[in-house]
Amino acid sequence: MYRYDEFDHKLVAERARQFRRQVKRRLSGELTEDQFKPLRLMNGLYMQLHAYMLRVNVPYGSLSSRQLRKFAHIARTYDRDFGHFTTRQNIQYNWIKLEDVPDILEELAEVEVTAIQSSGNCVRNITSDHYAGRARDELADPRVYAELLRQYTILNPEFSYLPRKFKIALTGSPRDRAAVALHDIGLRMHRNEAGETGFEVLVGGGQGRTPFIAHTIREWLAPEHLLSYVESILRVYNMYGRRDNMHKARIKIIVNQMGLDRYRELVEADWEQIRDSVLKVPQAEVDRINAYFEPPEYECLADIPDELNDVRARIPEFDQWMSANVAEHRVPGYSIVNISLKAPGLPPGDMTADTMDAVADLADRYSLDEIRVNHRQNLSFVDVRQLDLFTLWKKLKLLDLATPNIQTVSDIICCPGLDYCNLANSRSIPIAQDLSRHFVDVDHLALVGDFTINISGCMNACGHHHVGNIGILGVNKRGKEYFQLTLGGSSDENASLGDRLGRALPQDEVPAAVETIVDTYLAIRLDGERFLDTYRRAGIAPFREAVYNPVQARAVA
Amino acid sequence: MQMIIANRLTDGRVVFMDDAGDWVNEIADGLLLVSRQDADEHLSAAQQAVEENRVVDPYLIDVAADAGRRRPVLVRERIRAFGPSVGLVPQSRGVI
């Protein structure tokens, strides 16, 4: 876990005091709402449908049990006993009182957590692979560089008034679990021909009403140039980004309008001026930041496949959970455990204060005190001894946190939708609930295999519908909620945007349509094909026919 | 029929304007506006409440009577009036 240095402590404490004064001036009437809004947004405070909403950063998704307990305390003391983990590896509270926010920010600062830059036109929470530092296929831990970027971009005046919000994601593994191609800047570690580890730099990805997969602006960048190159990308964006139209203000629009080559020329020209400046990152600075990450103290253990296989053979339910929710760890004798926040019928990503406390206790005991939040709105324990897997499974089961559905059809990403969000056109959580109640047969989930369903309540796409294998977008037609399905999206290392299936469907037809799509896939898949493989081979036609012309489709079959 | 809905400044809660110009939590206690002129006049009063730092973002919503109960016409406003339609919210009444 990263521990704050003295600068972090000072900055965060000062910011909390500053916001206390700003809230006081707002409540006294000295500041109008128009004057106050940009100030509250810079501290993660929105006005939503029912109340103020506070978004709290979880930098690169990494949490200590102490921090999770504080989240539980905030939920219990200042909110309605629950929080919502988002696709940005953050937590949101839905029922916050303005007058409580200064106290909340001070309480969060005690455990080295902030809401700074969780909103507004600035560099947002920097996200990363939730397996960072633990994945077996990883080249290097991306969190050190995520932290370097966090320190450089936090309250940096040059990046505080960008044309629009700006999201950066990193991965150190070839297997992309951080959706880096859907970010304003994506950073993928890989080795160049000389065998040196560096970054492929992607730019201009994003979702929303105009989705784009990011383009590679530089094939390989030495880590020492990370800050200067990111700064040059941001400078060009600051210069050319559209401030006249918020719908055209993201970097993806500029990159795609002027063309990648032109954007690259501008960035490289700027970079030539600054690449060898003070922004060059010496290894000593990387080592200094690295020293603030307390390395976990692993025991000298060996993998125990035989012992685990014995238990798996005896207890099928444990076997299903092992297959779906447990991943390999780079250290022998350890595993990564994914904790599903998608039990049937529950809103994806929501967690009660009591459950947060219980998970924090389990993390203390079974995960060397560390929890990760991932962009699919689940949690992970990243340092579990294989010897403890069976015991941990039993304890998670008691908390309804052991649904064996990670990366399956019921592991649904879902935005808050019209139940909470001021921007939404339709509800999204009830669709996720319907689907998760529909797909409860664990054997069926395993049969269907690797699958993603992503639901957004409006075209802003917080639920990542563009990159779901099945994407579901809520729309409003003459005051009624309808749902537009897309197929074939993916956010992994071969990212793709989904294709529109056909006319939008009313809510009660969505589960049957999804089931039809799944059944069609099962009927036509070839050996070893995931849904995405089948879709890319067979195209949209068989799925479209099955959903919209079921009688004809059956006759043809 | 219309009503005026807003968020209270201090805690952000959804409130309705009542016949005394105060702001109340329950839709049943709010003021029903039946004429265009009435609606415009009360919306001006609501703007005054904004300037007095009592509420944020007041606006008119259409309301229908449904089995003797007031019910906003749009789903969005029903959710604002009655709370989210989904669970995990102990205080939610979950009526849509």
Image (tube, coloured by chain):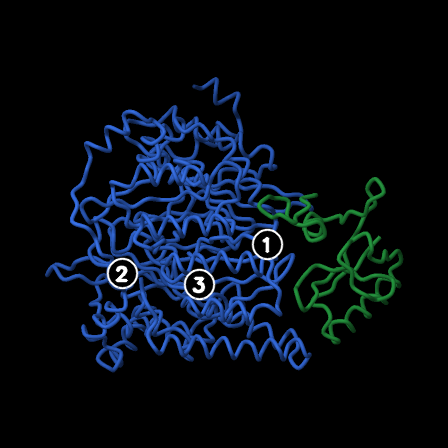
- Element on which disc 3 rests: loop
Which of pointers 2 and 3 indicates the residue nearer the eye?
A: 3
The answer to which of marks 2 and 1 sits earlier in the sequence is 1
Residue A39: image x %, image y %? 55, 75
Hue used for the chain lettered A: blue
Q: Which chain is green?
A: B
Q: Residue at x 60, y 41 (%)?
A: A482
- Splitting the image into 4 quarters, where does residue A67 fall? bottom left
What's the amino acid at mark 3? Asn
Q: Which label number is shown at residue A142?
A: 2
Residue A407: image x %, image y %? 38, 40
Extreme residue toward the top, this view: A555
Answer yes or no: is residue A436 visible: yes
Label 2 to label 1, Cα distance in Å? Answer: 35 Å
Disc 2 packing (10 Å; few <14; some 14–19; many ≥20)? many
Q: Which residue in the protein does label 3 denote?
A: A57
What's the amino acid at mark 1? Arg
Label 1 to label 3, Cα distance in Å? Answer: 19 Å
Establish whether labels 1 and 3 are both on one chain: yes
The answer to which of marks 2 and 3 sits earlier in the sequence is 3
Residue A338: image x %, image y %? 35, 44
